[in-house]
Structures are given as C-alpha cells and as structure tokens.
Image: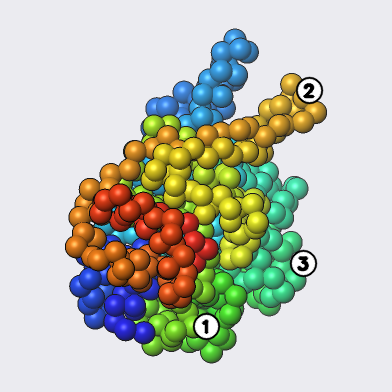
Amino acid sequence: MTLQEQNKLLYARAGFGISIADYRRPRPIKECVVGLFPPTTPGRLEMISEEEWAENSPKAMKELTDDLMRKEKQKAFRERAKDLNQLWVQAMVEAQYPLLEKMSIFWHGHFATHTANPYFDQLLLNDVRKNALGNFGDLLRAVSKSPAMLQFLNNQQNKKAHPNENFAREVMELFTLGRGHYTEQDIKEAARAFTGWAYDGYGMFVFHKGQHDDGEKQFLGRRGNWNGDDILNILLEQKQTALFISQKLYRYFVSDEKVNDKHVQQMAKHFYESNYDIAALLKHMFTADWFYDDSVKGAKVKAPVELLVGYQRLLPIEFRNQNTVTYIQRVLGQHLFNPPNVAGWPGGKNWIDSSSLVIRMQLPQALFMSKELNLDLKPTEQEIMMTHKVNQSTSPNKNVRIGQAIADWSSYVAEWKGYGRAELPKAMAEYLLPVAVSNSQLNALQQFCDKDNEEDYIKSVSILLMGMPEYQLC
C-alpha cells in the first residue's frame, strides 16, 4: 500500500472514514496513530438527569395512584431512549477523536444489554466511553456493577438462598474467557460469589452483605472465600481472557472472516503484559506492518451505524425527522441499545442480505438527493410486548419514509471542482471506495451521471459511487 492508502485504511477502521484534507496530505502512520487518542477522559453524554430518573423510578411509579397517568409517564420515559440514541450518534458525527466512539460501539456490543430503561442505558454508556480506551479490568468492573447489566442478567435476584447463574455464566462465556474454558461447577461457584450484588432505587451499585454467600468456593482451580471482585480478578489473571478479547478486536478492526492466529497471539501477549491497557494494544495493532497488508483492504463490511455516521461526517445532513436516525438503524439491523441478544450483534457478512444490500445501495440517493425510500420497519421487542398486552395477535410492520433530509454539499463540491469529467470518477472512487474498481465499471457509471453542470456532475458521481456494493466494505 502507498502511504495515502495506509492513511485511508487506518481512518476507516479506527474511525468512520478519512476526511478529504487528511486524504490529500498523508502523514507517517505513527504520527496518525498518536493523533487518534484523546488527551483527556471524555465528557459524559447526559440526556436524562438524575431528577428525571427520580420522577420515573419504580419507587415514584408505586406512589402514583392514577393508573392512566402512570402508564403515560412510563411510555414517555421509554421514548427518551430515542433521544439518547440520537445524542450518541451526534457525538459520533462530531467526534474530534472518532476512535473513542468506534471503541465504545465495540464494547457496547461486547457487553450487550437490553433494559428498556434509558437512564440505565445512559449510565452504562458513560461507563463504557470513560473506559473504552483505558484499562479493560476497570471497564469490566464498571460494567459488571452497572444497573443495566445487573438488571439484564438478573443479578438483582442473585441471593444466598437462591443463586442466579445468568451473570456468572455470561461474564465467562461472553466477556472474558470464551466458551469452553470453564466448567458448569465454575459457574455455580462464581454465582455464589456474586450474590448480594445489586442496585438501589437511584441506579447506584449496592452490596447486600446479608444476601451474600461468604462460604468457601472453588473457582478455576483456586479455593477461597471469594466475592464478586475476586472472581473478576481471577478471570483477568487468565491469559485466555487476553486472547479472547484480542480475537474479537482483530475481527472488529482487521478482518471479518480471516483471522491470523500468529498476529492474534502477538496481540494477546502484548495485552496481557500491559495489564490490559486497551490503548497500548490498539497502538500495537495500528502500527503493525501486517495491519496494512493488501489483503486487509475491503476485508470488513461496514456496520449500519458506521455507514450512517460515515455519511454524515462526509456530508452534513439535517434530518427533518430526527427519528430517521433510529429508523435506519432498525431497518439495517443495528439498533443502538437494542442488541438482538446477550451476545450482541454478530457483525461481518451478517450485516448483509439481499434486502439490506438493496436498501444500503438506495440510501445515498434518499439522504443526499431527498429521493423518498419507503421501508418496512419491523416492530421492536418492546412494541411486540405492548401489542400483546392489548390482546393483538400480530405486530404489523410499520411503513416509514426516508428521504426528508437536507444535505450541505458546499464544502464537499468545492474540494472536487477543477477535475476533468474523464478523471473525476477515478479520483473520487480512489477516495470513497476501499478497493479498486475497473475502468469499465467507471465508464458504465458515467452513463447515469447528471452532466448539466460541474456541481451536479460531482454530486451524481459521488452518489453513484456510494451506491455501489464496494462502498459497503472498508
């Protein structure tokens, strides 16, 4: 790869794409990598205040004697999930350090929860963003004690007399070791250690000593009066944890399908010896020669949120209906704060099927040229539950219209003026697409371009390139 191609790949994988300015002024990789990391801890994303949560907490709802008012308040509070979703997407679009948000999306899928409580989601999101580039041990402890995780995996019900094994199982299978590196007995013993972990009415972690099993436990071959923190520490002592996380990060940043075991082993060794320093691991990966091998180009499918944010960072878009942001997520299969299950989104080729590919290829015209696109929006799990509560046997798809958006083309068009009509498609394809396309493809594309004037030509070439299957890769 040329240095320009290396820069382009790095910014696509570590963020949401390279700016035209950075693309035209390539810099040494080590200099680029240093600039990916924010110098300070990120600020919190606050959509829901503690006061608002207090007014909508279970305790407050119990005190409401009017059933209709209670239901209306609960519905209105659940709707705040859309606001939180849009706030995070906007933070991605405006991010000065997009790697922070890219890693936050990774951890959001790794520590998947589904709570239907936007305040708990907000608390977890801020824990994730705070530690996304920090220490994995700190992140693991913070997430494990968050009300979202405690609720989602039922540790609120994990008590000495009746241990609940859900969290104990998933913390090993999905968050640290991976399947096959523990026994059923290890799960039972770990569940005993996590008894008493809960949260209070304000969403704060509490330890109920009277509900904790303080007896001796044997876990991963070690015996002691372990508590929950001890279990997490023992898991972090396992080299398998560093390997499991490194494997997932390799798939996330390098290749969906082909995993080079040698490179993953190098990553895991570096990760473990650095005491789980996430930033150090990423710097190791982003500066490795193998990260820029030609085989890496186009080896990943863009996730829906990555695609959506990439559009908005390329061209500022004003949505007339802010729900468009969540509509696109739902249609393409990555609705933030609503993972399909505890394992998160599978990613890779799972993002693409015949239906979603057609929608992806039509989206640029809908977003940038206000060409309407009608979509069938599948109901969320919450909507299905609500319709069932009122004795409806089915939850019909909702038809939504995308395309009511205004794009600001001014600065983008200015960057491409002066190119001849014959050379513009090739130059623009080299910038927008992760892999090379043939001259015959570019010649065919020109047949559909708007040639009335230079500005319209630039716009149409861009939109046609973004509608190509190759644009779905990175």
Q: Nearer the viewer, residue 114 or 58?
A: 114
**Earlier-in-chain disc, 3 versus 2:** 3
Q: Name the residue under label 1.
A: 264
Label 3 neighbourhood size at 10 Å, few (<14), some (14-19), many (20+)? few
**SS for dot 2:** loop
Taking depth in this image into account, of 176 and 361 the one nearest to the observer is: 361
Examine the rendered structure and indicate whether residue 145 appears above or below residue 266.
Answer: above
Q: Position of residue 462 (x, y in %)?
A: 37, 57
Quadrant containing the N terminus in the rendered view = bottom left
Residue type at mark 3?
Glu
Give coordinates of residue 302: x percent, y percent.
50, 62
> Which amino acid is tagged 1?
Val
Q: Which of marks 1 and 2 is nearer the N terminus?
A: 1
Location of residue 21 by image quarter: bottom left
Nearest-to-viewer mark from 3 and 2: 2
Q: Does residue 195 appear in the picture of this structure?
A: no
